[in-house]
Amino acid sequence: MITLKEIARRLGLSKSTVSRALRDSSEIGAETKQRVLELARELSYTPNPIALSLQRSRSQTIGIIVPEIANSFFGSVISGIEEVAYRQGYHITIYQSHDSSDREVTDVRNILVRRADGLVVSTASQIRNLDHFRTLQEQGIPVVFFDRKVENFQTHQVIVDDFDGAFRATEHLIEQGCRKLACLTGPQHLPIVQQRTGGFKAALQKHDLPIRAEWLVEGPFRQNSGNQLTKELFADLSDHPDGILAASTSIALGAHLAIREVGMKMPEEVALIGFSDPPIAPLLDPPLSSIAQPGFEMGQQSAELLIDMIEKKGKPIRYQTRILQTDLVVRRSSQRTQKV
Amino acid sequence: MITLKEIARRLGLSKSTVSRALRDSSEIGAETKQRVLELARELSYTPNPIALSLQRSRSQTIGIIVPEIANSFFGSVISGIEEVAYRQGYHITIYQSHDSSDREVTDVRNILVRRADGLVVSTASQIRNLDHFRTLQEQGIPVVFFDRKVENFQTHQVIVDDFDGAFRATEHLIEQGCRKLACLTGPQHLPIVQQRTGGFKAALQKHDLPIRAEWLVEGPFRQNSGNQLTKELFADLSDHPDGILAASTSIALGAHLAIREVGMKMPEEVALIGFSDPPIAPLLDPPLSSIAQPGFEMGQQSAELLIDMIEKKGKPIRYQTRILQTDLVVRRSSQRTQKV
DNA sequence: GTGAAAGCGCTAACAC
DNA sequence: GTGTTAGCGCTTTCAC
């Protein structure tokens, strides 16, 4: 690898002159600049980012922590972050928390130790304690939360209007003629889940439909759990839901399978709609309706906010929570009336 | 952030003594060691990895390039690499090539410039030219290829027995009574695709079945393409395949949809089996049979081989190509005979 | 057993 | 305009 020193040696100049020439400093003679630039190109010199990091204690890197990488929603978010970051000369490093808070703590430590300039994160679902993120912030490393909102934390957040999404999805089910609605929620300590549940209830209230506690079931964001809980909803075949809102993709997939397993006709006997819109939704039979979240855009906005904080380091900031709108994608699993 | 120098200052020692004490050097007095260790713990000192990298020109980081992150197969591979890497004190940084060779070249440059210690990669499918990887190797950064085998490149590779997988899947279709078999292949310049196609043909030959050129169709690894090509196979309803092998997950998903769209009964009129076994395979209707690839294990083995090369730097190496076995997962989409 | 000094590659304050 | 020096945090000769 070729270094500044080497260029300086070959040209009989000093390191600093070369450094300045390369950064197009105004105090270097045009001719010298020329020679330096030429040789640098010829030798295909690239500055050593590690040396730079050490010197500036800035790594031009932003850390990302997501529960799971192989998930189309997080995949889009990452691509969104990537796009903005690269454009602005930043690099990304991705960590998976596997939805474990221990792992998340370790990841945060790595981010700190490896001197990332900032962090974009969707917290592990079990998490309650945010101290590790606080530590990061105190060390001057800004944090942006996306998707999973957190409380009592002063920083930017980019989330989706979960309440509204759930509300519209529920109204949609009602419009399709469903009257006996159930909701498969997730871990109730997650604000995201509370919002979705809230939207569901609000829609029922608005339409004067009963909220049956036993049809508001809670379980982890896992396919198995969604499957199991759905089957339980159909334990009594004389009195079962005719419309289901699932609070996450995995739960929705589990439910979809369960409905077929118990032999119910979808959407005639039960309509189903799920949160987030995975690429396989249209492939299911019947194709799964969903509340699509703008992942790529969330990534972009998070990255913009973060980079802004990084570059304005120290300056006071008015923290904002950006709320993005969801998109209701109606497919056959929830379509009981004919399209006109 | 607390540094060596700071500890030295507080203890009235020199940086080097502290450094040595921390690394448990035998030439430091037991008592001094004790004091240093204590203070370090108290201050929760962590060595600055950037300084270390600069000093050793080793970053303890391994780079990974995959076509797409949000893909369950690559997700498992990454988790496999992660597991081994963390255990051995390495860090990973993930790049997506988005299956573009330009992007891949950029990623490789980043890996070089950021001084990763090694690279694990599944090349972008269009790629033919491997010069960028050669450059890396010449700079002393070892490379391990997985999944997509490359030719004429001296290094370790970890792949799957694609020929055998395709062969067994095809035989399975034949056992199920299929006699008119088609294969949706991928980009033919990919060795992986040639292997799969080869396995398919070999099985037909073994069973004296005709290989019809018009039923050996080629297209990119995209769902749309798989869908389109499948529909074309059914353009003539009086003469269509009764069994299809799809050379990738996305193609298989597209085909699955197409078969339903053209109104064919699966598996009765057409049986389908695809490569790789995504988590949604069991959720499709009918559930999709597939040739499962051991992603996690591929990741582990790749990481082991890579770390081995990194740590044996310079020593001569006997390069090996590890061939892992696939697993035939039979589900309803290809099951025409009753299980006994 | 401990310290001083050099160096990894780079920038920046301070000369001249 | 250009060079010298110091320093980012660490390890590693080389002295004593």
Image (cartoon, coloured by chain):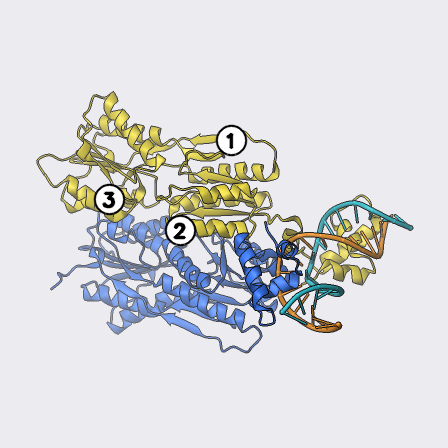
Chain colours: A blue, B yellow, C orange, D cyan
Q: Nearer the viewer, residue A228 or B114?
A: B114
Q: Are marks 1 and 3 on the same chain?
A: yes
**Residue B69 as seen in the image, left or right of residue B13:** left
Task: Specify whether residue A276 is in view.
Answer: yes
Residue C6 on image: x %, y %: 76, 53
Seen from the viewer's position, the closer of residues A209 and A88 is A88
Mark 1 falls on what kind of element? loop
Q: Is residue A160 above or below residue A45?
A: below
**For discs 1 and 3, the disc positioned in front in the rendered view:** 1
A181 over B76 or under it: above or below: below
Where residue B193 sits: x, y (%)? 32, 36
| Chain ID, mark 1 | B
> Circles 3 and 2: CB distance less than 8 Å?
no
Instruction: Identify the residue position indicated by label 2 in the image.
Output: B102
State which quarter of the image contains the C terminus of chain A.
bottom left
Q: Is residue A53 left or right of residue B29?
A: left
Whichever of callouts 1 and 3 sits on the residue coming sooner in the sequence is 3
| Image location of residue A100, percent across then percent down | 50, 53
- Report in which chain the residue with disc 2 lies: B
Q: Nearer the viewer, mark 2 or mark 1?
A: 2
Res. B226 mark: 3
Q: Which quarter of the figure has residue B176?
A: top left
Q: What distance separates the C-alpha of mark 1 from that of mark 3?
A: 36 Å
Near mark 1 (Cα within 10 A), the count class, few <14, some 14-19 or many ≥20, is: some
What is the number of the mark on residue B319? 1
**Image position of A45 (left or right of B204):** right
Query: Which is nearer the eye, B238 or A175?
Result: B238
Helix or strand or loop: what does disc 3 sit on?
helix
